[in-house]
Amino acid sequence: MRTEAKVLLGLGLFFGVMCAVYWNWGHENAGSVMMFAGMLLCFVPGGYYYWWSRRMRARPEDDPNATQAQGAGVVGAFPGTSIWPFTLGMGAFFVVLALVFGIWFLVPGLGLAMWALFGGTAEGRRGGTQ
Amino acid sequence: MTDVLDPPVAAHHDDHEHEEHHGPTGILKWMTTTDHKVIGMSYTVTAVIMMVIGGALAEVIRAQLTTSNNSLVSFAQYNELFTMHGSVMIYLFVGPFAFGALANIIVPIQIGAPDMAFPRLNALSYWLYLMGSITMLSGFFVAGGAANFGWVAYAPLSNSINTPGAGADLWIGGLLLTGFSAIFTGVNLCATIFYLRAPGMTMFRMPIFTWNLLITAILILLAFPVLTAGLIMLYCDRHFGTHIFSVQGGGVPVLWQHIFWFWGHPEVYILALPFFGMVTEIIAVFSRKPVFGYKGMVFATLSIGALSLGVWAHHMFTTGVVLLPFFSIMSLLIAVPTGIKMFNWIGTMWRGEVWFSTAMLMAVGFLITFLIGGLTGIYLASPPLDFFTHDTYFVVAHFHSIVMALVLGAMGGLYYWGPKITGYLLNETIGKIQFWFLFIGTQVFTLPMYLLGLRGMPRRVATYALHPGWQFLNQVSTVGAVLVGISTIAFMVNVVYSWKKYPAGDNPWDGHTLEWFTTSPPPHHNFYRLPQIRSERPTWDYNHPGHTAAEHGHHQVHHEEIPAP
């Protein structure tokens, strides 16, 4: 966990320094704001990982001498098959078509998206199709 | 050291066999899958189709330019052609092929994970990418034709007065969908790499390919939201009467360029880094050596990623409103980590037992082509030279050298990992024919463009009647484009010819990394068992047990370690 944190914090630090240099040298708003946001986008998860890395024992994947047995047990819940990503994708497709061909495309678009939202959430609560 | 213990994922396996037997079949199976390998395969097929479409558009462009005053296509059609060629290749082929196709399949296997961290999100990424591609391409079938403002959609050319019509809106909509697809893939890759590594797979034991995809994913998360925001602003300008990018309403047209390139330059590295990773893996395996300078490679990738956020305005030197020295220095600095990578690749091959399989040839072709593109990129980072060559064919040649290098890398990746994904090797003879057509074709079609650019030929012109002297070089370039087209046909012939003909076995190349430890194709959830991971090449350690795994920088000379045939 600590290496992950260092990667993100290091990138964030570099973006911060670059942003400071750029702002003081060029006084250009758009780029400075975007670099500042880039810094935050690295600092927030990086800081979170660093905070956790000081409070947890090294995970098996952080331990250079770990055996495979240490990773035994449930890795995570991996859903089997699911139709909802397809439904949501089609919903997003129709929403985008509404941008081009007319507002009425929002009806199937948002309809499919909401259906996928409820269906996917319900499926997630059941732990996927096992 | 090399004993194999029970796999962490074995417990799941029985459940899923049951599910596999009773799950949906046929097209419904494809539509409902959340298996990263199936999704990755869908990505691969879709991206290769996009490459063929984009390539066909390119051939029409090159055909139009064979004579100075050709009338094969009209000016308006030519605008659509080069816009959609660039858009299809960048947005729909190279990017999704890099971080959607091979990354999706290989990264979880390389780190010993059963799947991507969010399988359903992964499936959603694919559907958004597919529908985004269809949306963008459907511009050809609407009144007014496809988008025709260049793949960069500069304001004010892209506003509703200069570019009315549905084609441009479909282009924006397609990009929104593929943009979200990329963002979700980025989230997925980050989470997978941070949370699903096998025990013992520390960050500094991850294969370089996985490292590069991690940096790519972080760059995606930094860059793509900016593009998405910019596209929404552009749409508002076109339809809701805002004036974000128009001078009349107090907006700033250059802001679009800032936003676009703030995405667009990291995008170049989002495209390139996965292929750097592929080439690193290929060169190490086919040189029978560990990667030379593993940590140097990782830090070079990290610094390329870091610097890539501070170079966007080198695309805007001629606007006159950007800080030239800052962007020039940052752009030149990128040559340093890229140079480190270049020397590390050569160092990996140096005194290795090099096996010139098709994948290795593609990787070496990548190095040469990328070197040409990279060095000319250094010229362009210098503002005085850029003022001279901006918007000429020199720039076109520069980035075509880069992206054709990526195509060589992509083909290398397909020849290298194809057997793992499908279980069958491709024919090596046809592969080598394909390589020579692709490699020579690439040079024949890009090198004349450099000269044309230096002689002043501008980009995006359909005719050049006043400069008949440019005709010969254009014809040479067209010949090169045809050679590249033949190489693509050779690839398709190879796929058909080799269809289920040469069973690969688990480890046809004596590979280093975990994907070569499992079966070809890998089972559901990837592994029946895992080896102990004690270095960055666990499969090699397992297959060559006499040789102690050493930490980085302490690898022994491996001459005597070559396995007996």
Image (cartoon, coloured by chain):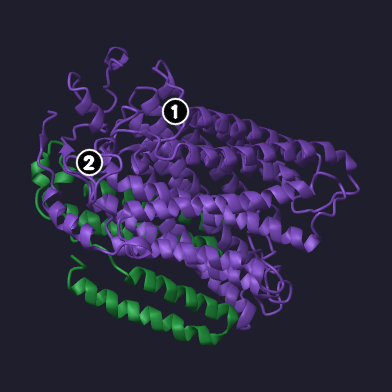
Q: Is residue A41 left or right of residue B137?
A: left
Determine the colour of chain A: green
Q: Amino acid at mark 2?
A: Thr
Mark 2 is surrounded, within 10 Å at the Cα level, by few (under 14), some (14 to 19) or many (20 or more) other residues, namely many
Q: Position of residue B31 (x, y in %)?
A: 37, 65
The part of the image, by quadrant, that contains residue B420 is top left
Looking at the rendered structure, whether the residues under marks 2 and 1 are on a common chain is answered as: yes
Callout 1: chain? B
Badge 2 or badge 1: first in the primary sequence: 2
Q: In which quadrant will I find the C terminus of chain B? A: top left
Q: Which residue is mark 1?
A: B345
Is residue B497 rendered to the left or right of residue B473?
left
**Residue B383 x, y percent position in the rendering:** 67, 45
Mark 1, other Cα within 10 Å: few <14 / some 14–19 / many ≥20 = many
Residue B202: assigned label: 2
Furthest-right residue in this view: B466
Q: Secondary structure at mark 1?
A: helix
